[in-house]
């Protein structure tokens, strides 16, 4: 039997060796992958070529190939980038996304490192008293018209007194994993719940419609993700390096910046990119917190739906210039992203 | 906060730098805690207060009047019930059968925990809460999707979350398995398939509106061939919802794909080859080797997606404006619309209900799916 040459069916359906696929399976695989490639590419292609069309080319039915069935023009590009103020929202987006991502990664990785390496114990009673006082301040200011400066001073005094008298007597405490869980669980909070008070807060500080307001808010909403991902990178590096540095007299900050951070570089790149994409595409908070001066790209894009109907050619220019940089950066650093997310997901 | 590895007693004589080092733990965590207090805890408390009051514009500012649970009453049983919960249809045989099936499944899980494991008080309470939530949401979804019913924003959000995430997971896993095979050009597919994740959701919404244009979109000739060019997906509830799901799936399948592919590449190669030599087929290898190896990661990516999916607003807002009627309106969009009509109390109340639902769902998923999946691996 074994000497018999393999029949056609067997040759088609069985792999020739362990490391390869049967011909039929291989064809099916490539066909399916090609279909999904079309799913990914067609929308992007359509946006890209629409940006070279004008009202005429869009309204007179679908045209697919530039130079073949329609003449591409740079009119929309000229209109959006030269005649209009697209540059300003674009710079807003760049500044806000980069600054908030840098801040979030710095603050978040510091906290994650400390939570991995240093044992914390916070008395539950202190947390409870803090929250009760915070609520009391808000009620006092909102319903009884107490001046907020006075309320805060009184509450701070009460808190210090409680810290020295009541809290020391209690035993219940929350540890590192509880603090971590609390920080990460903040991501579950839908931004719509927090955005109204944040709006009022910035209004009171006269920071509404500024880049500062957006940077601060984006830093806060992306902080949980940074802590979630980076804590696993730090937990994965061996202790000996840091310990020997500490014996040599380096402070914890020095150890963090000169030893721990460089060791998790690849993970930091992934975290940075993911947070950058999230900040770059954020819509809801920008809609509330920015108006004209600090307007970011997603808000500008969504505002293109004018009373004359959406002008697809202009919109396509905006979408193209918005996605081009992230696609280029991410394609270059793509390997880091997969690896970084994997580490986060395994242990997170 | 007390960092137990420091001794702050003799702080007087130490230099400034030593003090800094001694308290480094607290100083490192402090910025994160302050940021979260300012932008999460503090706003949450104010929102709770807003949800319990009525906001009104007054000369020279505004007034806030404490009205207790009236905002919630208005939403759950009052004039806004139609908007939030929808209109209830009549329960037929199919609905009762489905409900019985879900109830039996939940009861089975609960009974198994109580009888087989060692039930703890916290565990039991958590499971009862999760079961009650699942039951409530199931009844709501079935009742509003029954004949004569109209789903409200809660059911729309659930649809985006559960149907959307399931489809994205299935597609992402399928593509990752295809790409995980010994094929050429894996890196090309990896880079290409990742791209939609980076496109801003607002941009995706407009792009899909362009693509789905029945007269001028790229598929117009195809549509004309089928003779349905007069029909518009935007005017019917289910086709509009489908469009939102399609856009969301286009964006988020890459996320599932990229992480699952990395996990598949990490699976024990020698086991796979040994199984092949023993004559195991593809399905057996997937069931016995690949799936156990990637289950913890799969559970975690689904959790991350669940958390984010509850917040959906940009896609329905731009793609359909929440319409037709309120067929595609998510809870966040509902809250945003309330805010725009100066109903700040109602807006905060909706936000709080969304927070309540998403917290219970996500924490339950973490405790009952992600944790067991990880223990399974260890």
Image: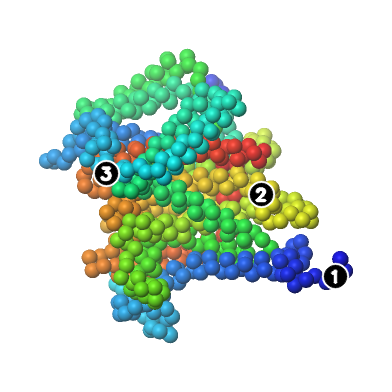
Q: Residue at x 51, y 69 (%)?
A: A38
Q: Residue at x 51, y 23 (%)?
A: B121
Packing grade of label 2 (10 A; few <14, some 14-19, many >=20) is few
Badge 1 and badge 2 both on one subunit: no
Q: Name the residue under label 1.
A: A4
Callout 2 secondary element: helix
Q: Name the residue under label 3.
A: B82
Residue situated furthest left in the rendering: B59
Give the mark nearer the N terminus: 3 vs 2.
3
Coordinates of residue A127 in the picture (x, y in percent)? 43, 26
Give me the disc on residue B287: 2
Q: Circles 3 and 1: CB distance less than 8 Å? A: no
Disc nearest the viewer among 3 and 1: 1
Give me the disc on residue B4: none
Callout 3 secondary element: helix
Chain of the residue on which disc 3 is drawn: B
Viewer-nearest residue: A261 or B61: B61
Figure colour scheme = rainbow
Chain of the residue on which disc 1 is drawn: A
Viewer-nearest residue: B122 or A226: B122
Packing grade of label 1 (10 A; few <14, some 14-19, many >=20) is few
Disc nearest the viewer among 1 and 2: 1
Q: Residue at x 41, y 68 (%)?
A: A320
Coordinates of residue B238 in the picture (x, y in percent)? 36, 56
A251 left or right of A226 in image: right
Q: Distance between the residues labelled 3 and 1?
A: 73 Å
Packing grade of label 3 (10 A; few <14, some 14-19, many >=20) is some
Badge 3 and badge 2 both on one subunit: yes
Chain of the residue on which disc 2 is drawn: B
Coordinates of residue B185 in the picture (x, y in percent)? 63, 67
Residue B368 appears in the picture as rendered: yes
Q: Distance between the residues labelled 3 and 2?
A: 45 Å
């Amino acid at each position: 039997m074994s000497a018999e040459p393999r029949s056609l069916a067997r040759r088609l359906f069985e792999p020739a060796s362990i490391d390869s696929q049967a011909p039929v399976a291989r064809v099916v695989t490539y066909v399916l992958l090609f279909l999904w490639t079309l799913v990914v590419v067609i929308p992007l292609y359509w946006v890209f070529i629409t940006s070279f069309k004008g009202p005429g080319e869009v309204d007179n039915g679908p045209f697919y190939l530039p130079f073949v069935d329609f003449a591409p023009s740079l009119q929309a590009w000229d209109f959006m980038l030269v005649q209009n103020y697209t540059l300003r929202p674009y710079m807003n987006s760049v500044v806000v996304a980069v600054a908030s991502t840098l801040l979030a990664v710095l603050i978040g990785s510091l906290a994650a490192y400390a939570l991995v390496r240093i044992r914390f114990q916070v008395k539950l009673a202190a947390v409870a008293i803090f929250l009760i006082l915070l609520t009391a301040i808000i009620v006092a200011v909102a319903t009884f018209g107490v001046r907020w400066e006075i309320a805060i001073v009184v509450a701070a005094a009460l808190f210090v007194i409680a810290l020295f008298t009541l809290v020391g007597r209690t035993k219940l405490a929350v540890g590192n994993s509880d603090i971590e869980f609390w920080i990460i669980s903040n991501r579950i909070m839908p931004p719509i719940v927090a955005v109204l008070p944040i709006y009022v807060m910035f209004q009171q500080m006269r920071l509404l419609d500024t880049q500062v307001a957006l940077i601060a808010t984006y830093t806060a909403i992306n902080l949980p993700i940074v802590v979630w991902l980076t804590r696993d990178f730090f937990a994965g590096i061996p202790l000996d390096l840091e310990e020997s540095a500490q014996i040599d007299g380096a402070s914890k900050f020095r150890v963090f910046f000169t030893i721990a951070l460089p060791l998790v570089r690849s993970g930091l790149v992934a975290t940075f990119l993911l947070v950058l994409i999230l900040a770059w595409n954020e819509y809801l908070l920008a809609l509330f917190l920015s108006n004209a001066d600090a307007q970011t790209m997603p808000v500008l894009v969504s505002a293109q739906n004018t009373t004359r109907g959406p002008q697809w050619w202009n919109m396509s220019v905006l979408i193209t210039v918005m996605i081009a940089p992230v696609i280029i950066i991410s394609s270059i650093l793509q390997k880091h992203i997969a690896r970084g997310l994997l580490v986060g997901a395994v242990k997170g | 906060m007390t960092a137990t590895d420091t001794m702050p007693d003799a702080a007087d004589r130490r230099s400034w730098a030593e003090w800094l080092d001694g308290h480094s733990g607290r100083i490192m965590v402090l910025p994160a805690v302050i940021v979260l207090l300012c932008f999460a805890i503090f706003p949450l408390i104010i929102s709770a207060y807003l949800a319990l009051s009525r906001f009104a514009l007054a000369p020279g500012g505004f007034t806030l009047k404490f009205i207790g649970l009236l905002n919630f009453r208005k939403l759950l049983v009052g004039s806004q019930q139609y908007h939030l919960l929808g209109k209830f249809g009549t329960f037929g045989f199919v609905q009762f059968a489905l409900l019985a099936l879900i109830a039996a499944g939940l009861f089975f899980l609960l009974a198994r925990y109580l009888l087989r494991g060692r039930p703890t008080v916290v565990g039991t309470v958590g499971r009862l809460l999760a079961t009650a939530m699942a039951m409530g949401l199931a009844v709501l979804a079935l009742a509003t999707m029954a004949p004569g019913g109209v789903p409200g924003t809660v059911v729309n959000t659930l649809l985006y979350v559960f149907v959307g995430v399931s489809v994205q997971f299935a597609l992402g896993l399928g593509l990752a398995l295809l790409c995980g095979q010994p094929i050429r050009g894996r890196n090309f597919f990896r880079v290409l398939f990742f791209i939609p994740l980076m496109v801003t959701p607002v941009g995706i919404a407009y792009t899909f509106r362009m693509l789905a244009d029945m007269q001028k979109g790229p598929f117009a000739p195809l549509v004309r061939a089928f003779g349905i060019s007069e029909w518009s997906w935007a005017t019917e509830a289910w086709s509009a919802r489908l469009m939102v799901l399609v856009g969301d799936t286009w964006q988020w399948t890459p996320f599932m794909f990229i992480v699952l592919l990395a996990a598949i590449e990490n699976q024990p190669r020698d086991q796979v080859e040994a199984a092949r030599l023993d004559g195991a087929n593809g399905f057996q290898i997937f069931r016995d080797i690949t799936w156990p190896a990637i289950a913890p990661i799969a559970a975690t990516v689904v959790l991350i997606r669940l958390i984010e999916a509850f917040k959906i607003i940009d896609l329905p807002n731009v793609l359909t404006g929440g319409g037709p009627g309120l067929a595609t309106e998510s809870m966040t969009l509902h809250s945003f619309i309330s805010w725009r009509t100066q109903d700040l109390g109602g807006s905060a109340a909706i936000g709080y209900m969304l927070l309540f639902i998403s917290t219970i769902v996500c924490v339950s998923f973490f405790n009952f799916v992600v944790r067991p999946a990880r223990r399974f691996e260890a």
